[in-house]
Image: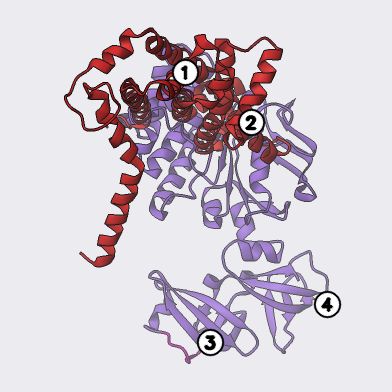
Chain colours: A purple, B red
């Protein structure tokens, strides 16, 4: 089977004087699930629309396999597109909606009926074929949109925040369903979202966008554990950022000196040079409270607020050197203390391997 | 019930009465047996309806109204729909200017239009012809179609059309399979407006129509000056019934097109 990667080469897109996509170079592998993640206005939807053919790049090329596609009209690209608001045809019933792309391809009537049935069964909507979209719930509409985008067996499926309008429980179910379909059908999926947890759970790779540029691209684990910038660290999940100066960066570990005195032992990293201003990122769930024994970093601090979240407590601390946010998992050893209340003095500790350095 | 509610109800009733009082006043006279268009009604009869059917002047004017109305509906429907589609195009320069131009006949005094048309139609040999009257009526009917179709086009989500494109439909197919069916209720009610406008139009007809294109409205107008016959009331009755019928048909089509099928 011929490889059909999607390649963006030096793609720019401007609306008037506003540059929405800035020199994008990106290769999407065949069969990959890539999420485009970023705040609104970061250019991620524009990139998807250029891929679908609804926008054309101001400059640069987009190709699929060996074919250049950036000048091809949308109806010749053969990509499935799932829109945020589902975009079902309101005047057609479910079966006619799903049959539409097959009719456009001149497929025989009998084959259409069979393929539609199979596609609707795939999204568990076989019993609702005669309904109008207006008679379906949001989740059902999204499944119809999914079936319609997949029924003509496109190799690439584009999804523009497809789950944004669904409630949390349904969204999580659909995330699992889409992932399962992706694996089963070997699709290339480009998935636009501003929901970082959605991107983390679904993707093979995540491209984090900020102001029209890719801030970082990598596996969910890389993006979360090894963010390259303050923007990525703060956009993906919650984090504690501490400013300091790199005092030592060796094989065994690195030390960051804090402006108010004291140090943090951190994971060594190749990038930052000695005596450079840097940021240290520590994820809230990596910090332990009042844990005995030897740890790389421990500080005393005062609890300023503790909020119950069911599965965890979110505790805000004011340390002598800096403030923290800690997520205390209620199943962990932290549970030895039944309650944390504002004003308590505690010891916070975290290991050097959970501290990640970023350029300031 | 509080005083304010009573006041509100009374005001509503008065407003409705104010609007339909002229109809209430004229309609019973259609069934009078008297030869005068006045109250009291001595006896009820259908003689004036018979008169409409039998008298050549009336019969011809009804046929003319139907011919002109149908022609106007088709022409204004097509032109107005195309105009509304064009106005929707995002690449349009000065869209406000174009929209105003299409709606202008609504506010330009009909007398001015009529004079202009008469002079112009005589020049091009268009005067005293059905085509001339239909064109004149179309000018004043198009704005209604543009407004109505624009409203229904505005209700179409662009993403639905984009979805159709992405599913492999060419722009023409998208128009045929998605845009047009979704705009159809607007087109139909625009057409009803166009037909009603044409039925009702007197001023332009006075200027451009010859004796052979005398429409029902025009015939009523001259009858009321020449001999005040209750045939006018009968014609008015036909008018109202016809308009209501057309509106009812449009409503029916509209509700059928939006009515969801019963769940399986």
Residue B264 visible in the shown view? no
Which residue position holds label 1?
B69
Residue A314 vs residue B157, the one in the foreground: B157
User: Alpha carbon of mark 3 to alpha carbon of mark 4: how far?
Assistant: 28 Å
Disc 2 to disc 4: CB gap under 8 Å: no
For the record, the magenta segment spans A340-347
Residue A190: x %, y % from top left: 60, 41
User: Alpha carbon of mark 1 to alpha carbon of mark 3: how far?
Assistant: 88 Å
Tell me which residue sits at (42%, 9%) in the image: B60
In this view, the mark in front (1 or 3): 1
User: Alpha carbon of mark 2 to alpha carbon of mark 4: how far?
Assistant: 85 Å
Residue B250: x %, y % from top left: 38, 26
- Mark 4 Cα-neighbour bin, 10 Å: few <14, some 14–19, many ≥20: some
Which residue position holds label 2?
B112
| Co-location on one chain, circles 1 and 2 | yes
| Co-location on one chain, circles 1 and 4 | no
Earlier-in-chain disc, 1 versus 2: 1
Q: Is residue B55 above or below residue A68?
A: above
In this view, the mark in front (2 or 4): 2
In this view, the mark in front (1 or 2): 2
Q: Is residue B115 above or below residue A329?
A: above
Report helix, strand or loop for mark 4: loop
Which residue position holds label 4?
A275
Chain name for mark 4:
A
Report helix, strand or loop for mark 2: helix
Report helix, strand or loop for mark 1: helix
Tell me which residue sits at (69%, 18%) in the image: B120
Would you identify the image quadrant in which residue A13 lies? top right
Tell me which residue sits at (40%, 25%) in the image: B224
Which residue position holds label 3?
A347
Report helix, strand or loop for mark 3: strand
Q: Is residue A230 left or right of residue B106?
A: right
């Amino acid at each position: 089977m011929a490889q059909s990667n999607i390649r963006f080469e030096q793609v720019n897109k401007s609306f008037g004087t506003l540059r929405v996509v800035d020199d994008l170079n990106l290769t999407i592998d065949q069969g990959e699930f890539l999420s485009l993640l970023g705040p609104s206005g970061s250019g991620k939807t524009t990139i998807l629309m250029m891929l679908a053919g609804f926008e054309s790049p101001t400059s640069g090329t987009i190709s699929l396999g060996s074919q250049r596609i950036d000048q091809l009209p949308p109806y010749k690209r053969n990509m499935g597109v799932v829109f945020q608001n589902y975009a079902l045809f309101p005047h057609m019933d479910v079966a006619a909606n799903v049959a539409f792309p097959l009719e456009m391809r001149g497929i025989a009537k009998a084959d259409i009926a069979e393929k539609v049935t199979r596609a609707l069964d795939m999204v568990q909507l076989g019993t609702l074929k005669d309904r109008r979209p207006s008679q379906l719930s949001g989740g059902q509409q999204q499944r119809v949109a999914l079936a319609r985008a997949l029924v003509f067996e496109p190799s690439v499926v584009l999804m523009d925040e497809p789950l944004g309008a669904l409630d949390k429980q349904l969204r999580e179910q659909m995330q699992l369903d889409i992932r399962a379909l992706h694996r089963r059908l070997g699709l290339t999926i480009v998935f636009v979202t501003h929901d970082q947890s959605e991107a983390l759970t679904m993707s093979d790779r995540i491209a984090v966008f900020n102001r029209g540029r890719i801030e970082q691209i990598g596996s969910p684990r890389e993006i979360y554990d090894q963010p390259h910038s303050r923007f990525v660290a703060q956009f993906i999940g919650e984090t504690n950022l501490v400013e300091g100066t790199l005092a030592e960066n060796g094989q065994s570990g690195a030390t960051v000196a804090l402006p108010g005195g004291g140090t943090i032992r951190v994971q060594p990293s190749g990038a930052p040079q000695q005596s450079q201003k840097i940021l240290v990122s520590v994820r809230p769930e990596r910090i332990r409270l009042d844990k005995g024994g030897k740890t790389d970093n421990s500080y005393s601090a005062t609890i300023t607020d503790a909020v119950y979240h069911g599965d965890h407590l979110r505790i805000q601390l004011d340390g002598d050197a800096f403030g923290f946010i800690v997520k205390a998992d209620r199943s962990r050893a932290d549970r030895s203390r039944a309650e944390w209340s504002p004003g308590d003095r505690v010891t916070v500790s975290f290991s050097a391997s959970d501290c990640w350095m970023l350029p300031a | 019930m509080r005083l304010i509610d009573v006041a509100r109800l009374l005001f509503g009733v008065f407003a409705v009465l104010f609007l339909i009082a002229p109809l209430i006043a004229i309609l019973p006279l259609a069934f009078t047996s008297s030869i005068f268009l006045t109250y009291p009604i001595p006896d009820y009869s259908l003689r004036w309806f018979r008169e409409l059917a039998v008298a050549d002047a009336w019969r011809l004017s009804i046929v003319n109204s139907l011919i002109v109305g149908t022609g106007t509906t088709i022409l204004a429907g097509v032109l107005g729909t195309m105009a509304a589609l064009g106005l929707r195009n995002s690449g349009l320069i000065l869209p406000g200017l174009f929209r105003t131009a299409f709606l202008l006949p609504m506010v330009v005094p009909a007398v001015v239009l009529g004079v202009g048309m008469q002079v112009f139609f005589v020049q091009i040999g268009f005067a005293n012809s059905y085509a001339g009257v239909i064109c004149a009526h179309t000018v004043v009917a198009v704005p209604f179609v543009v407004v109505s179709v624009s409203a229904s086009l505005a209700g179409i989500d662009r993403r639905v059309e984009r979805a159709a494109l992405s599913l492999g439909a060419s722009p023409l197919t998208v128009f045929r399979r998605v845009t047009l069916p979704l705009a159809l209720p607007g087109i139909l009610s625009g057409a009803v407006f166009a037909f009603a406008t044409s039925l009702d139009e007197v001023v332009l007809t006075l200027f451009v129509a010859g004796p052979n294109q005398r429409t029902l409205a025009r015939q009523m107008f001259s009858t009321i000056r020449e001999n005040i016959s209750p045939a006018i009331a009968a014609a008015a009755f036909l008018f109202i019934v016809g308009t209501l019928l057309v509106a009812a048909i449009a409503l029916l089509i509209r509700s059928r097109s939006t009515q969801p099928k019963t769940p399986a």
